[in-house]
Amino acid sequence: MSGLNGAEFYSAYDEEIGEEKETIIQEAINRYLVDNIPVQYILGYSYFFGYPFDVDENVLIPRPETEELVSYVLAEYDHYFSGEEVTVVDIGTGSGAIAITLAKEEPLMKVYATDISQPALVVAKKNAQKLGAEVEFIAGDLLQPLIVRELKFDILVSNPPYIPKKEEVQSIVKDNEPHIALFGGETGLYFYEQILANAHKILKPKNIIAFEHSYSQKKEMLTIAAKYFPQGKARVIQDMFGKDRIMIIVNDDKDD
Ligand code: SAM
Ligand code: GLN
Protein backbone atom coordinates (compact mmCIF):
# COMPACT_ATOMS: atom_id res chain seq x y z
CA MET A 1 0.00 0.00 0.00
CA SER A 2 2.89 2.36 0.81
CA GLY A 3 4.54 1.34 -2.45
CA LEU A 4 7.68 0.50 -0.48
CA ASN A 5 9.25 -2.83 0.31
CA GLY A 6 10.08 -3.77 3.90
CA ALA A 7 13.61 -2.33 3.90
CA GLU A 8 12.52 0.90 2.18
CA PHE A 9 9.62 1.22 4.58
CA TYR A 10 11.82 1.07 7.67
CA SER A 11 14.52 3.36 6.31
CA ALA A 12 11.82 5.91 5.47
CA TYR A 13 10.18 5.52 8.86
CA ASP A 14 10.68 9.17 9.94
CA GLU A 15 9.45 10.68 6.70
CA GLU A 16 5.98 12.12 6.18
CA ILE A 17 4.01 9.90 3.82
CA GLY A 18 1.77 12.57 2.34
CA GLU A 19 -1.99 12.85 2.32
CA GLU A 20 -2.65 10.76 -0.77
CA LYS A 21 -0.82 7.68 0.52
CA GLU A 22 -2.27 8.15 3.97
CA THR A 23 -5.77 7.91 2.53
CA ILE A 24 -4.90 4.75 0.59
CA ILE A 25 -3.38 3.12 3.67
CA GLN A 26 -6.26 4.19 5.91
CA GLU A 27 -8.76 2.71 3.45
CA ALA A 28 -6.83 -0.54 3.33
CA ILE A 29 -6.76 -0.74 7.13
CA ASN A 30 -10.51 -0.14 7.23
CA ARG A 31 -11.13 -2.88 4.69
CA TYR A 32 -9.30 -5.25 7.00
CA LEU A 33 -10.56 -4.07 10.38
CA VAL A 34 -14.07 -2.93 9.50
CA ASP A 35 -15.00 -4.99 6.43
CA ASN A 36 -13.15 -8.15 7.53
CA ILE A 37 -11.41 -8.61 4.15
CA PRO A 38 -8.32 -10.90 4.20
CA VAL A 39 -5.02 -9.01 3.98
CA GLN A 40 -4.00 -11.03 0.91
CA TYR A 41 -7.03 -9.81 -1.07
CA ILE A 42 -6.33 -6.23 0.01
CA LEU A 43 -2.69 -6.44 -1.06
CA GLY A 44 -3.58 -8.49 -4.13
CA TYR A 45 -0.93 -11.14 -3.55
CA SER A 46 0.12 -13.95 -1.25
CA TYR A 47 3.42 -15.80 -0.94
CA PHE A 48 3.38 -19.54 -1.64
CA PHE A 49 6.58 -21.59 -1.54
CA GLY A 50 8.47 -18.30 -1.71
CA TYR A 51 6.72 -17.15 -4.88
CA PRO A 52 4.40 -14.14 -4.98
CA PHE A 53 1.01 -15.24 -6.35
CA ASP A 54 -1.61 -12.71 -7.36
CA VAL A 55 -4.90 -13.44 -5.61
CA ASP A 56 -8.36 -11.93 -5.80
CA GLU A 57 -11.80 -12.94 -4.60
CA ASN A 58 -12.09 -15.50 -7.43
CA VAL A 59 -9.42 -17.74 -5.93
CA LEU A 60 -8.70 -19.38 -2.60
CA ILE A 61 -5.78 -17.79 -0.76
CA PRO A 62 -3.16 -20.55 -0.88
CA ARG A 63 -2.50 -22.08 2.54
CA PRO A 64 0.72 -23.20 4.24
CA GLU A 65 -0.61 -26.78 4.49
CA THR A 66 -0.72 -26.81 0.71
CA GLU A 67 2.97 -25.89 0.58
CA GLU A 68 3.53 -29.10 2.51
CA LEU A 69 1.46 -31.02 -0.04
CA VAL A 70 3.74 -29.65 -2.78
CA SER A 71 6.84 -30.68 -0.80
CA TYR A 72 5.53 -34.24 -0.50
CA VAL A 73 4.78 -34.42 -4.22
CA LEU A 74 8.36 -33.33 -4.97
CA ALA A 75 9.72 -35.90 -2.51
CA GLU A 76 7.57 -38.70 -3.97
CA TYR A 77 8.73 -37.71 -7.45
CA ASP A 78 12.35 -37.97 -6.30
CA HIS A 79 11.67 -41.38 -4.81
CA TYR A 80 9.74 -42.97 -7.67
CA PHE A 81 10.61 -41.00 -10.81
CA SER A 82 13.90 -39.23 -10.13
CA GLY A 83 15.52 -37.93 -13.33
CA GLU A 84 12.50 -38.93 -15.45
CA GLU A 85 10.17 -36.69 -17.39
CA VAL A 86 6.69 -37.00 -15.93
CA THR A 87 3.26 -35.57 -16.64
CA VAL A 88 1.47 -34.08 -13.68
CA VAL A 89 -2.04 -32.72 -13.24
CA ASP A 90 -3.38 -30.39 -10.55
CA ILE A 91 -7.18 -30.65 -10.28
CA GLY A 92 -8.88 -27.44 -9.09
CA THR A 93 -5.86 -25.21 -9.43
CA GLY A 94 -7.36 -21.93 -8.14
CA SER A 95 -4.53 -19.37 -8.14
CA GLY A 96 -2.32 -22.01 -9.79
CA ALA A 97 -0.28 -22.32 -6.60
CA ILE A 98 0.35 -26.09 -6.73
CA ALA A 99 0.78 -26.44 -10.50
CA ILE A 100 3.02 -23.41 -10.95
CA THR A 101 5.21 -24.25 -7.97
CA LEU A 102 5.74 -27.81 -9.21
CA ALA A 103 6.64 -26.56 -12.68
CA LYS A 104 9.11 -24.07 -11.17
CA GLU A 105 10.68 -26.52 -8.74
CA GLU A 106 10.99 -29.56 -11.01
CA PRO A 107 11.66 -28.78 -14.67
CA LEU A 108 11.18 -32.45 -15.60
CA MET A 109 7.50 -32.16 -14.72
CA LYS A 110 5.17 -31.34 -17.59
CA VAL A 111 2.33 -29.77 -15.65
CA TYR A 112 -1.36 -29.47 -16.51
CA ALA A 113 -3.92 -27.74 -14.33
CA THR A 114 -7.71 -27.66 -14.42
CA ASP A 115 -10.46 -25.64 -12.81
CA ILE A 116 -14.19 -25.33 -13.35
CA SER A 117 -14.00 -21.61 -12.56
CA GLN A 118 -13.07 -19.46 -15.56
CA PRO A 119 -12.28 -16.40 -13.39
CA ALA A 120 -9.90 -18.55 -11.32
CA LEU A 121 -8.15 -19.69 -14.49
CA VAL A 122 -7.63 -16.06 -15.52
CA VAL A 123 -5.75 -15.49 -12.24
CA ALA A 124 -3.81 -18.77 -12.57
CA LYS A 125 -2.71 -18.01 -16.14
CA LYS A 126 -1.56 -14.54 -15.12
CA ASN A 127 0.46 -16.07 -12.26
CA ALA A 128 2.09 -18.62 -14.57
CA GLN A 129 3.11 -15.86 -16.93
CA LYS A 130 4.40 -13.57 -14.18
CA LEU A 131 6.36 -16.33 -12.49
CA GLY A 132 7.68 -17.75 -15.76
CA ALA A 133 6.15 -21.21 -15.38
CA GLU A 134 5.02 -23.42 -18.21
CA VAL A 135 1.65 -24.87 -17.27
CA GLU A 136 -1.14 -26.03 -19.55
CA PHE A 137 -4.47 -24.78 -18.15
CA ILE A 138 -7.70 -26.54 -19.06
CA ALA A 139 -11.20 -25.48 -18.05
CA GLY A 140 -13.74 -28.10 -17.04
CA ASP A 141 -15.34 -30.33 -14.46
CA LEU A 142 -12.83 -32.47 -12.55
CA LEU A 143 -11.28 -35.16 -14.80
CA GLN A 144 -13.75 -34.75 -17.67
CA PRO A 145 -11.63 -32.44 -19.86
CA LEU A 146 -8.61 -34.73 -19.39
CA ILE A 147 -10.55 -37.87 -20.24
CA VAL A 148 -11.89 -36.39 -23.48
CA ARG A 149 -8.35 -35.33 -24.47
CA GLU A 150 -7.10 -38.83 -23.64
CA LEU A 151 -4.28 -37.42 -21.53
CA LYS A 152 -2.34 -39.78 -19.24
CA PHE A 153 -0.47 -38.76 -16.09
CA ASP A 154 2.20 -40.06 -13.76
CA ILE A 155 1.14 -37.81 -10.89
CA LEU A 156 -2.28 -36.46 -9.88
CA VAL A 157 -2.39 -33.80 -7.18
CA SER A 158 -5.40 -31.97 -5.83
CA ASN A 159 -6.53 -29.75 -3.01
CA PRO A 160 -10.24 -29.90 -3.79
CA PRO A 161 -12.98 -28.14 -1.83
CA TYR A 162 -13.36 -30.29 1.29
CA ILE A 163 -15.30 -28.46 3.97
CA PRO A 164 -18.51 -30.35 4.83
CA LYS A 165 -21.55 -28.24 3.90
CA LYS A 166 -22.74 -27.73 7.47
CA GLU A 167 -19.36 -27.21 9.13
CA GLU A 168 -18.84 -23.86 10.79
CA VAL A 169 -16.29 -21.74 8.95
CA GLN A 170 -14.53 -18.58 10.20
CA SER A 171 -16.37 -15.54 8.86
CA ILE A 172 -13.23 -14.05 7.25
CA VAL A 173 -13.08 -17.21 5.11
CA LYS A 174 -16.81 -17.77 4.51
CA ASP A 175 -17.61 -14.14 3.74
CA ASN A 176 -14.73 -13.61 1.32
CA GLU A 177 -13.35 -16.74 -0.32
CA PRO A 178 -15.21 -18.42 -3.19
CA HIS A 179 -17.63 -21.05 -1.88
CA ILE A 180 -16.93 -23.14 -4.98
CA ALA A 181 -13.39 -23.47 -3.60
CA LEU A 182 -14.43 -24.36 -0.06
CA PHE A 183 -17.36 -26.73 0.19
CA GLY A 184 -17.13 -30.40 -0.69
CA GLY A 185 -20.78 -31.44 -0.46
CA GLU A 186 -22.68 -32.87 2.50
CA THR A 187 -19.71 -34.82 3.95
CA GLY A 188 -16.81 -32.92 2.35
CA LEU A 189 -15.77 -36.07 0.51
CA TYR A 190 -17.63 -35.57 -2.77
CA PHE A 191 -14.58 -34.52 -4.81
CA TYR A 192 -12.33 -37.35 -3.60
CA GLU A 193 -14.97 -39.92 -4.53
CA GLN A 194 -15.45 -38.37 -7.95
CA ILE A 195 -11.74 -38.07 -8.67
CA LEU A 196 -10.75 -41.52 -7.40
CA ALA A 197 -13.65 -43.26 -9.14
CA ASN A 198 -12.37 -41.97 -12.49
CA ALA A 199 -8.66 -41.56 -11.90
CA HIS A 200 -7.76 -44.87 -13.59
CA LYS A 201 -8.92 -43.32 -16.87
CA ILE A 202 -6.19 -40.68 -16.81
CA LEU A 203 -3.36 -42.36 -14.91
CA LYS A 204 -0.46 -44.43 -16.19
CA PRO A 205 -0.06 -47.87 -14.54
CA LYS A 206 2.67 -46.56 -12.22
CA ASN A 207 1.38 -43.40 -10.61
CA ILE A 208 1.16 -41.25 -7.54
CA ILE A 209 -1.97 -39.53 -6.22
CA ALA A 210 -1.63 -36.78 -3.62
CA PHE A 211 -4.50 -34.98 -1.88
CA GLU A 212 -4.94 -32.36 0.78
CA HIS A 213 -7.97 -33.20 2.92
CA SER A 214 -9.85 -32.26 6.07
CA TYR A 215 -8.12 -32.95 9.39
CA SER A 216 -11.11 -35.02 10.54
CA GLN A 217 -11.24 -37.47 7.65
CA LYS A 218 -8.19 -39.69 7.76
CA LYS A 219 -10.27 -42.85 8.14
CA GLU A 220 -12.72 -41.92 5.42
CA MET A 221 -9.93 -40.95 3.02
CA LEU A 222 -8.14 -44.27 3.52
CA THR A 223 -11.44 -46.11 2.98
CA ILE A 224 -12.07 -44.34 -0.34
CA ALA A 225 -8.48 -44.99 -1.41
CA ALA A 226 -8.82 -48.71 -0.65
CA LYS A 227 -12.12 -48.84 -2.51
CA TYR A 228 -10.72 -47.51 -5.80
CA PHE A 229 -7.05 -48.51 -5.53
CA PRO A 230 -7.04 -51.71 -3.48
CA GLN A 231 -3.52 -52.57 -4.69
CA GLY A 232 -2.19 -49.07 -3.97
CA LYS A 233 -0.17 -48.05 -0.94
CA ALA A 234 -2.07 -45.27 0.81
CA ARG A 235 -0.87 -43.26 3.77
CA VAL A 236 -1.95 -40.11 5.60
CA ILE A 237 0.55 -37.52 6.77
CA GLN A 238 0.07 -34.81 9.38
CA ASP A 239 0.67 -31.17 8.63
CA MET A 240 2.91 -28.82 10.65
CA PHE A 241 0.00 -28.22 13.03
CA GLY A 242 -0.17 -31.93 13.82
CA LYS A 243 -3.41 -32.44 11.87
CA ASP A 244 -4.06 -35.32 9.47
CA ARG A 245 -3.97 -33.41 6.21
CA ILE A 246 -2.31 -35.14 3.30
CA MET A 247 -3.00 -38.50 1.69
CA ILE A 248 -0.58 -40.11 -0.73
CA ILE A 249 -1.45 -43.18 -2.78
CA VAL A 250 1.39 -44.90 -4.61
CA ASN A 251 0.48 -47.34 -7.35
CA ASP A 252 3.68 -49.11 -8.29
CA ASP A 253 3.86 -52.76 -9.34
CA LYS A 254 7.34 -53.02 -7.81
CA ASP A 255 5.95 -52.22 -4.37
CA ASP A 256 3.73 -55.31 -4.28
N1 SAM B 1 -5.34 -25.54 -5.75
C1 SAM B 1 -5.60 -24.25 -5.12
C2 SAM B 1 -4.88 -24.19 -3.79
O1 SAM B 1 -4.51 -25.27 -3.28
O2 SAM B 1 -4.69 -23.11 -3.24
C3 SAM B 1 -7.09 -24.01 -4.95
C4 SAM B 1 -7.79 -25.06 -4.16
S1 SAM B 1 -9.48 -24.70 -3.79
C5 SAM B 1 -9.64 -25.49 -2.24
C6 SAM B 1 -10.40 -25.78 -4.85
C7 SAM B 1 -10.49 -25.38 -6.33
O3 SAM B 1 -11.29 -26.35 -7.01
C8 SAM B 1 -11.14 -24.04 -6.61
O4 SAM B 1 -10.30 -23.25 -7.41
C9 SAM B 1 -12.44 -24.37 -7.36
O5 SAM B 1 -12.81 -23.43 -8.34
C10 SAM B 1 -12.09 -25.71 -7.98
N2 SAM B 1 -13.25 -26.56 -8.29
C11 SAM B 1 -14.42 -26.66 -7.63
N3 SAM B 1 -15.24 -27.53 -8.23
C12 SAM B 1 -14.55 -28.02 -9.31
C13 SAM B 1 -14.86 -28.97 -10.33
N4 SAM B 1 -16.03 -29.60 -10.36
N5 SAM B 1 -13.93 -29.21 -11.29
C14 SAM B 1 -12.72 -28.56 -11.26
N6 SAM B 1 -12.38 -27.67 -10.32
C15 SAM B 1 -13.29 -27.39 -9.35
N1 GLN C 1 -8.09 -25.19 4.28
C1 GLN C 1 -9.19 -24.39 3.81
C2 GLN C 1 -9.93 -23.81 4.99
O1 GLN C 1 -10.17 -24.48 5.96
C3 GLN C 1 -10.15 -25.22 2.96
C4 GLN C 1 -9.52 -25.58 1.69
C5 GLN C 1 -10.27 -26.64 0.99
O2 GLN C 1 -11.47 -26.84 1.13
N2 GLN C 1 -9.55 -27.33 0.21
O3 GLN C 1 -10.31 -22.65 4.95
Image: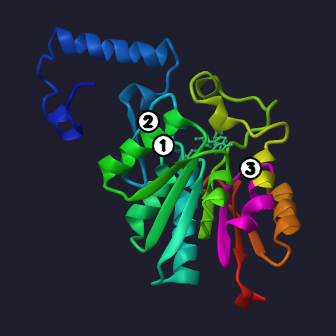
Residue 80 in which image quadrant: bottom right
Q: CA distance from mark 3 to mark 2?
A: 25 Å
Q: Residue at x 20, y 32 (%)?
A: 4
Question: Which residue was labeled with disc 3?
Answer: 215
Label 2 is placed on what type of residue? Val
Label 3 is placed on what type of residue? Tyr
Q: Are marks 1 and 2 in contact (CB under 8 Å)?
A: yes
Front position among marks 1 and 3 = 1
Mark 1 surroundings within 10 Å by alpha-carbon count, few (fewer than 14), some (14 through 19), many (20 or more): many
Q: Quadrant of the C terminus?
A: bottom right
Choose between 20 and 183: the one closer to the eye. 183
Displayed-image quarter of ligand 2: top right
Tell me the element at label 1: loop
Tell me the element at label 3: loop
Question: Which residue was labeled with disc 2?
Answer: 55
Q: Residue at x 77, y 60 (%)?
A: 198
Question: Which residue was labeled with disc 1?
Answer: 95
**Does residue 169 sit above or below 199 in this rendering?**
above
Q: How are the residues colored?
A: rainbow
| Direction from residue 239 to residue 23 in the image, left or right | left
User: Of label 1 and label 3, which has the lower sequence position?
Assistant: 1
Q: Residue at x 51, y 44 (%)?
A: 62
Residue range (magenta): 195-217
